[in-house]
Image (cartoon, rainbow, N blue to C red):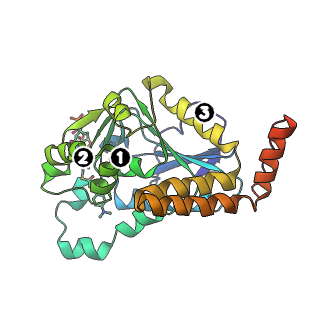
Amino acid sequence: MTSTASMTKPPRENAPPPGATESLILAETDGAVGIIRFNRPKVLNALNPELMTQLADQLEAWDADDSLHVLLITGGDRAFAAGADIGDMAERSVVEMEQRNQFATWDRIRRVRKPIVAAVSGFALGGGCELMMMCDVVVASETAQIGQPEINLGVMPGAGGTQRLTRAVGKAVAMDMILTGRFMDAGEALQRGLVSRVVPPEHCYTEALKIARLMASKGPIALRIAKEAVNKAFESSLAEGVEYERKLFYMLFATDDQKEGMRAFVDKRRPKFEGK
Ligand code: DAK
Protein backbone atom coordinates (compact mmCIF):
# COMPACT_ATOMS: atom_id res chain seq x y z
CA MET A 1 0.00 0.00 0.00
CA THR A 2 1.34 3.42 -0.87
CA SER A 3 0.72 6.46 1.32
CA THR A 4 2.11 9.95 1.29
CA ALA A 5 3.95 11.32 4.26
CA SER A 6 6.40 13.98 5.18
CA MET A 7 8.55 12.37 7.81
CA THR A 8 11.91 11.86 9.30
CA LYS A 9 11.19 8.24 10.19
CA PRO A 10 10.76 5.40 7.69
CA PRO A 11 7.33 3.84 7.16
CA ARG A 12 6.43 2.01 10.37
CA GLU A 13 6.42 -1.74 10.64
CA ASN A 14 2.84 -2.93 10.96
CA ALA A 15 0.64 -5.98 10.93
CA PRO A 16 -1.98 -6.50 8.21
CA PRO A 17 -5.64 -6.33 9.23
CA PRO A 18 -7.15 -9.80 9.82
CA GLY A 19 -7.76 -11.56 6.52
CA ALA A 20 -5.70 -9.10 4.49
CA THR A 21 -2.72 -10.16 2.40
CA GLU A 22 0.48 -9.56 4.30
CA SER A 23 2.35 -6.55 3.02
CA LEU A 24 6.00 -7.49 3.03
CA ILE A 25 7.03 -3.99 2.08
CA LEU A 26 5.74 -0.64 3.29
CA ALA A 27 5.68 2.14 0.76
CA GLU A 28 5.13 5.87 0.98
CA THR A 29 6.22 9.02 -0.78
CA ASP A 30 7.96 12.15 0.43
CA GLY A 31 7.75 14.80 -2.29
CA ALA A 32 9.57 13.34 -5.30
CA VAL A 33 11.09 10.47 -3.26
CA GLY A 34 9.46 7.04 -3.15
CA ILE A 35 10.33 5.17 0.04
CA ILE A 36 10.15 1.41 0.59
CA ARG A 37 10.74 -0.34 3.86
CA PHE A 38 11.04 -4.13 4.18
CA ASN A 39 8.48 -5.49 6.60
CA ARG A 40 9.62 -8.92 7.83
CA PRO A 41 11.33 -7.87 11.06
CA LYS A 42 10.89 -11.25 12.78
CA VAL A 43 13.17 -12.94 10.24
CA LEU A 44 15.51 -9.98 9.83
CA ASN A 45 13.83 -9.05 6.54
CA ALA A 46 14.76 -12.32 4.84
CA LEU A 47 14.01 -11.81 1.16
CA ASN A 48 11.46 -14.43 0.16
CA PRO A 49 10.09 -14.51 -3.41
CA GLU A 50 6.86 -12.72 -2.39
CA LEU A 51 8.78 -9.83 -0.86
CA MET A 52 11.02 -9.59 -3.91
CA THR A 53 7.98 -9.53 -6.20
CA GLN A 54 6.30 -6.80 -4.14
CA LEU A 55 9.56 -4.84 -4.19
CA ALA A 56 9.99 -5.16 -7.96
CA ASP A 57 6.31 -4.26 -8.56
CA GLN A 58 6.58 -1.10 -6.45
CA LEU A 59 9.92 -0.02 -7.90
CA GLU A 60 8.67 -0.51 -11.45
CA ALA A 61 5.46 1.40 -10.74
CA TRP A 62 7.43 4.31 -9.32
CA ASP A 63 10.00 4.13 -12.11
CA ALA A 64 7.13 4.88 -14.49
CA ASP A 65 5.69 7.66 -12.32
CA ASP A 66 6.94 11.09 -13.44
CA SER A 67 6.16 12.69 -10.09
CA LEU A 68 8.92 10.63 -8.41
CA HIS A 69 12.59 11.18 -9.21
CA VAL A 70 14.48 9.13 -6.63
CA LEU A 71 13.70 5.89 -4.77
CA LEU A 72 14.83 4.91 -1.29
CA ILE A 73 15.00 1.40 0.17
CA THR A 74 15.47 0.66 3.85
CA GLY A 75 15.03 -2.11 6.40
CA GLY A 76 14.87 -2.06 10.18
CA ASP A 77 17.37 -1.12 12.87
CA ARG A 78 18.56 -4.71 13.29
CA ALA A 79 18.70 -5.68 9.65
CA PHE A 80 18.52 -4.19 6.21
CA ALA A 81 18.05 -7.79 5.03
CA ALA A 82 19.81 -10.94 6.32
CA GLY A 83 19.67 -12.60 2.93
CA ALA A 84 17.33 -14.66 0.84
CA ASP A 85 14.91 -16.73 2.92
CA ILE A 86 16.88 -19.84 3.78
CA GLY A 87 13.81 -21.76 4.94
CA ASP A 88 12.20 -21.15 1.56
CA MET A 89 15.22 -22.53 -0.32
CA ALA A 90 16.46 -25.31 1.95
CA GLU A 91 14.64 -28.27 0.39
CA ARG A 92 14.33 -27.08 -3.20
CA SER A 93 15.73 -29.18 -6.01
CA VAL A 94 17.80 -27.74 -8.82
CA VAL A 95 14.83 -28.24 -11.16
CA GLU A 96 12.49 -26.31 -8.85
CA MET A 97 15.04 -23.51 -8.50
CA GLU A 98 15.42 -23.32 -12.26
CA GLN A 99 11.66 -23.42 -12.89
CA ARG A 100 10.91 -20.67 -10.36
CA ASN A 101 13.33 -18.40 -12.24
CA GLN A 102 13.55 -15.89 -9.40
CA PHE A 103 16.40 -14.16 -11.15
CA ALA A 104 13.76 -12.58 -13.39
CA THR A 105 12.54 -10.58 -10.37
CA TRP A 106 16.05 -9.45 -9.50
CA ASP A 107 16.58 -8.45 -13.13
CA ARG A 108 13.48 -6.24 -12.94
CA ILE A 109 15.08 -4.36 -10.05
CA ARG A 110 18.38 -4.08 -11.89
CA ARG A 111 16.53 -2.41 -14.78
CA VAL A 112 15.04 0.39 -12.64
CA ARG A 113 16.32 3.60 -14.21
CA LYS A 114 15.78 6.08 -11.39
CA PRO A 115 18.50 6.33 -8.76
CA ILE A 116 17.98 4.17 -5.69
CA VAL A 117 19.34 5.21 -2.29
CA ALA A 118 19.74 2.49 0.36
CA ALA A 119 19.67 3.19 4.10
CA VAL A 120 21.42 0.20 5.67
CA SER A 121 21.37 -0.55 9.39
CA GLY A 122 22.42 -3.87 10.90
CA PHE A 123 22.77 -6.96 8.74
CA ALA A 124 23.07 -6.76 4.95
CA LEU A 125 23.96 -10.35 4.18
CA GLY A 126 23.84 -12.62 1.16
CA GLY A 127 20.97 -11.44 -1.01
CA GLY A 128 20.67 -8.42 1.30
CA CYS A 129 24.22 -7.41 0.41
CA GLU A 130 23.55 -8.15 -3.27
CA LEU A 131 20.44 -5.98 -3.20
CA MET A 132 22.37 -3.22 -1.42
CA MET A 133 25.02 -3.37 -4.15
CA MET A 134 22.30 -2.94 -6.79
CA CYS A 135 21.40 0.39 -5.18
CA ASP A 136 23.19 3.53 -6.29
CA VAL A 137 24.00 5.45 -3.10
CA VAL A 138 24.39 3.50 0.14
CA VAL A 139 24.14 5.23 3.51
CA ALA A 140 25.28 2.80 6.19
CA SER A 141 24.71 3.01 9.90
CA GLU A 142 27.71 2.42 12.18
CA THR A 143 25.91 -0.82 13.09
CA ALA A 144 26.01 -2.22 9.56
CA GLN A 145 27.34 -5.76 9.14
CA ILE A 146 27.84 -6.59 5.49
CA GLY A 147 28.73 -9.96 4.04
CA GLN A 148 28.23 -12.82 1.62
CA PRO A 149 28.03 -15.76 4.05
CA GLU A 150 26.48 -18.24 1.57
CA ILE A 151 29.63 -20.38 1.86
CA ASN A 152 28.42 -21.34 5.36
CA LEU A 153 25.29 -22.82 3.75
CA GLY A 154 27.20 -24.87 1.22
CA VAL A 155 26.44 -22.52 -1.64
CA MET A 156 27.79 -19.28 -3.09
CA PRO A 157 26.33 -15.86 -3.92
CA GLY A 158 23.84 -16.17 -6.77
CA ALA A 159 22.37 -12.72 -7.32
CA GLY A 160 25.46 -10.95 -8.59
CA GLY A 161 27.55 -11.06 -5.40
CA THR A 162 30.67 -12.62 -6.87
CA GLN A 163 30.67 -10.01 -9.63
CA ARG A 164 29.53 -6.77 -7.95
CA LEU A 165 31.51 -7.31 -4.75
CA THR A 166 34.66 -8.06 -6.73
CA ARG A 167 34.23 -4.95 -8.84
CA ALA A 168 33.56 -2.86 -5.73
CA VAL A 169 36.33 -4.04 -3.40
CA GLY A 170 38.76 -5.93 -5.66
CA LYS A 171 39.58 -9.62 -5.95
CA ALA A 172 41.59 -10.12 -2.75
CA VAL A 173 38.94 -8.72 -0.41
CA ALA A 174 36.05 -10.28 -2.33
CA MET A 175 37.71 -13.69 -2.13
CA ASP A 176 38.32 -13.18 1.59
CA MET A 177 34.67 -12.35 2.21
CA ILE A 178 33.08 -14.91 -0.11
CA LEU A 179 35.35 -17.84 0.79
CA THR A 180 35.36 -17.25 4.57
CA GLY A 181 31.86 -15.75 4.92
CA ARG A 182 33.19 -13.04 7.24
CA PHE A 183 31.23 -9.85 7.83
CA MET A 184 32.60 -6.39 7.11
CA ASP A 185 31.73 -3.56 9.47
CA ALA A 186 30.62 -0.14 8.27
CA GLY A 187 34.03 1.49 8.68
CA GLU A 188 35.73 -1.12 6.53
CA ALA A 189 32.91 -0.99 3.98
CA LEU A 190 33.40 2.77 3.64
CA GLN A 191 37.16 2.45 3.42
CA ARG A 192 36.81 -0.16 0.65
CA GLY A 193 34.23 1.81 -1.32
CA LEU A 194 31.33 -0.57 -0.74
CA VAL A 195 29.14 2.10 0.86
CA SER A 196 28.90 5.84 0.22
CA ARG A 197 28.66 7.24 3.76
CA VAL A 198 28.62 6.01 7.35
CA VAL A 199 26.56 7.78 10.00
CA PRO A 200 25.41 7.08 13.57
CA PRO A 201 22.44 4.70 13.66
CA GLU A 202 19.94 7.37 14.64
CA HIS A 203 20.85 9.42 11.56
CA CYS A 204 20.96 6.62 8.98
CA TYR A 205 17.45 7.02 7.61
CA THR A 206 17.31 10.82 7.85
CA GLU A 207 20.68 11.16 6.12
CA ALA A 208 19.55 8.82 3.33
CA LEU A 209 16.33 10.78 2.93
CA LYS A 210 18.27 14.04 2.88
CA ILE A 211 20.47 12.73 0.07
CA ALA A 212 17.45 11.40 -1.81
CA ARG A 213 15.70 14.77 -1.52
CA LEU A 214 18.82 16.57 -2.72
CA MET A 215 19.12 14.25 -5.71
CA ALA A 216 15.41 14.65 -6.40
CA SER A 217 15.94 18.40 -6.78
CA LYS A 218 18.20 17.81 -9.80
CA GLY A 219 17.11 17.28 -13.38
CA PRO A 220 15.42 13.87 -13.55
CA ILE A 221 16.69 13.04 -17.03
CA ALA A 222 20.29 13.78 -16.09
CA LEU A 223 19.87 11.67 -12.93
CA ARG A 224 18.73 8.65 -14.92
CA ILE A 225 21.33 9.01 -17.63
CA ALA A 226 24.18 9.57 -15.16
CA LYS A 227 23.14 6.40 -13.31
CA GLU A 228 23.21 4.51 -16.59
CA ALA A 229 26.66 5.87 -17.43
CA VAL A 230 28.19 4.99 -14.05
CA ASN A 231 26.71 1.49 -14.21
CA LYS A 232 28.28 1.08 -17.63
CA ALA A 233 31.66 1.23 -15.89
CA PHE A 234 30.80 -2.13 -14.32
CA GLU A 235 29.96 -3.78 -17.59
CA SER A 236 32.53 -2.65 -20.11
CA SER A 237 36.17 -1.91 -20.74
CA LEU A 238 37.36 1.62 -19.94
CA ALA A 239 37.50 2.54 -23.63
CA GLU A 240 33.93 1.30 -24.24
CA GLY A 241 32.70 3.02 -21.09
CA VAL A 242 34.24 6.36 -22.00
CA GLU A 243 32.81 6.12 -25.51
CA TYR A 244 29.37 5.36 -24.07
CA GLU A 245 29.61 8.21 -21.57
CA ARG A 246 30.44 10.62 -24.38
CA LYS A 247 27.31 9.68 -26.34
CA LEU A 248 25.08 10.08 -23.28
CA PHE A 249 26.73 13.40 -22.47
CA TYR A 250 26.02 14.77 -25.96
CA MET A 251 22.47 13.43 -25.72
CA LEU A 252 21.75 15.54 -22.64
CA PHE A 253 22.24 18.66 -24.78
CA ALA A 254 18.95 17.74 -26.43
CA THR A 255 17.07 18.28 -23.15
CA ASP A 256 15.41 21.43 -21.82
CA ASP A 257 16.92 20.61 -18.43
CA GLN A 258 20.43 21.11 -19.81
CA LYS A 259 19.49 24.53 -21.20
CA GLU A 260 17.74 25.49 -17.97
CA GLY A 261 20.58 24.22 -15.74
CA MET A 262 23.31 26.05 -17.62
CA ARG A 263 21.29 29.23 -18.19
CA ALA A 264 20.41 29.34 -14.50
CA PHE A 265 24.09 29.14 -13.65
CA VAL A 266 24.94 31.95 -16.04
CA ASP A 267 22.00 34.04 -14.73
CA LYS A 268 23.04 33.31 -11.12
CA ARG A 269 19.68 31.81 -10.16
CA ARG A 270 18.42 28.38 -9.04
CA PRO A 271 17.46 26.07 -11.91
CA LYS A 272 13.89 24.88 -12.32
CA PHE A 273 14.07 21.42 -13.88
CA GLU A 274 11.02 20.10 -15.74
CA GLY A 275 12.31 16.67 -16.69
CA LYS A 276 12.07 17.47 -20.40
N1 DAK B 1 16.44 -16.58 6.08
C1 DAK B 1 15.42 -16.95 6.91
N2 DAK B 1 15.36 -16.62 8.22
C2 DAK B 1 16.38 -15.89 8.71
C3 DAK B 1 17.46 -15.44 7.90
C4 DAK B 1 17.47 -15.82 6.52
N3 DAK B 1 18.42 -15.42 5.65
N4 DAK B 1 18.31 -14.74 8.68
C5 DAK B 1 17.76 -14.72 9.92
N5 DAK B 1 16.60 -15.40 9.94
C6 DAK B 1 15.71 -15.60 11.07
C7 DAK B 1 16.27 -16.61 12.06
O1 DAK B 1 15.99 -17.93 11.66
C8 DAK B 1 15.52 -16.23 13.31
O2 DAK B 1 14.22 -16.74 13.22
P1 DAK B 1 13.53 -17.45 14.52
O3 DAK B 1 14.46 -18.52 14.91
O4 DAK B 1 13.46 -16.34 15.54
O5 DAK B 1 12.21 -17.91 14.02
C9 DAK B 1 15.42 -14.72 13.21
O6 DAK B 1 15.63 -14.41 11.83
C10 DAK B 1 16.49 -14.00 14.01
O7 DAK B 1 17.73 -14.54 13.66
P2 DAK B 1 18.78 -15.10 14.74
O8 DAK B 1 18.09 -15.64 15.93
O9 DAK B 1 19.69 -16.03 14.01
O10 DAK B 1 19.54 -13.76 15.13
P3 DAK B 1 21.06 -13.59 15.56
O11 DAK B 1 21.20 -12.17 15.98
O12 DAK B 1 21.49 -14.67 16.50
O13 DAK B 1 21.90 -13.82 14.21
C11 DAK B 1 22.38 -13.48 11.86
C12 DAK B 1 21.71 -12.89 13.14
C13 DAK B 1 22.02 -12.54 10.72
C14 DAK B 1 23.88 -13.52 12.03
C15 DAK B 1 21.83 -14.90 11.61
O14 DAK B 1 20.40 -14.86 11.64
C16 DAK B 1 22.25 -15.46 10.30
O15 DAK B 1 23.38 -15.95 10.14
N6 DAK B 1 21.35 -15.46 9.33
C17 DAK B 1 21.59 -16.04 8.01
C18 DAK B 1 22.48 -15.14 7.19
C19 DAK B 1 22.78 -15.76 5.87
O16 DAK B 1 23.36 -16.85 5.76
N7 DAK B 1 22.42 -15.06 4.79
C20 DAK B 1 22.62 -15.57 3.42
C21 DAK B 1 21.41 -16.39 3.02
S1 DAK B 1 21.60 -17.14 1.41
C22 DAK B 1 18.57 -16.02 -5.50
C23 DAK B 1 18.88 -14.73 -5.12
C24 DAK B 1 19.58 -14.51 -3.95
C25 DAK B 1 20.00 -15.58 -3.17
C26 DAK B 1 19.71 -16.88 -3.55
C27 DAK B 1 19.00 -17.09 -4.73
N8 DAK B 1 17.85 -16.26 -6.69
C28 DAK B 1 17.31 -15.14 -7.45
C29 DAK B 1 17.48 -17.57 -7.09
C30 DAK B 1 20.68 -15.30 -1.92
C31 DAK B 1 20.99 -16.25 -1.03
C32 DAK B 1 21.23 -15.87 0.36
O17 DAK B 1 21.13 -14.74 0.75
Residue 211 location, quadrant: top right
| Element class at badge 3 | helix
For badge 3, the amino acid type reads: Lys
* Foreground tag (1 vs 3): 1
Q: Position of residue 108 (x, y in %)?
A: 47, 65
> Residue at 39% across / 51% down in the picture?
131
Which residue is label 2 attached to? 174
Label located before the other in sequence (1 or 3) = 1
226 relative to 103, above or below: above
Q: Position of residue 252 (x, y in %)?
A: 70, 58
Report crowding for label 2: few under 14, some 14 to 19, many 20 or more residues within 10 A (C-alpha). Answer: many
Report crowding for label 1: few under 14, some 14 to 19, many 20 or more residues within 10 A (C-alpha). Answer: some
For badge 1, the amino acid type reads: Ala
Q: Nearer the viewer, residue 53 or 63?
A: 63
Report crowding for label 3: few under 14, some 14 to 19, many 20 or more residues within 10 A (C-alpha). Answer: few
Label located before the other in sequence (2 or 3) = 2
| Element class at badge 1 | helix
Which residue is label 3 attached to? 210
Quadrant location of the C terminus in the rendered image: bottom right
As measured in the structure, the alpha-carbon distance from the residue carrying label 1 to the one carrying label 3 is 24 Å
Using the rendered image of the protein, determine whether residue 21 is visible from the camera's viewpoint.
Answer: no
Which residue is label 1 attached to? 168
Per the rendering, the mark at residue 151 is none
> Residue at 44% across / 62% down in the picture?
53
For badge 2, the amino acid type reads: Ala
- 260 sits left or right of 234 in the view: right
Q: Position of residue 191 (x, y in %)?
A: 35, 31
Q: Nearer the viewer, residue 171 or 105?
A: 171
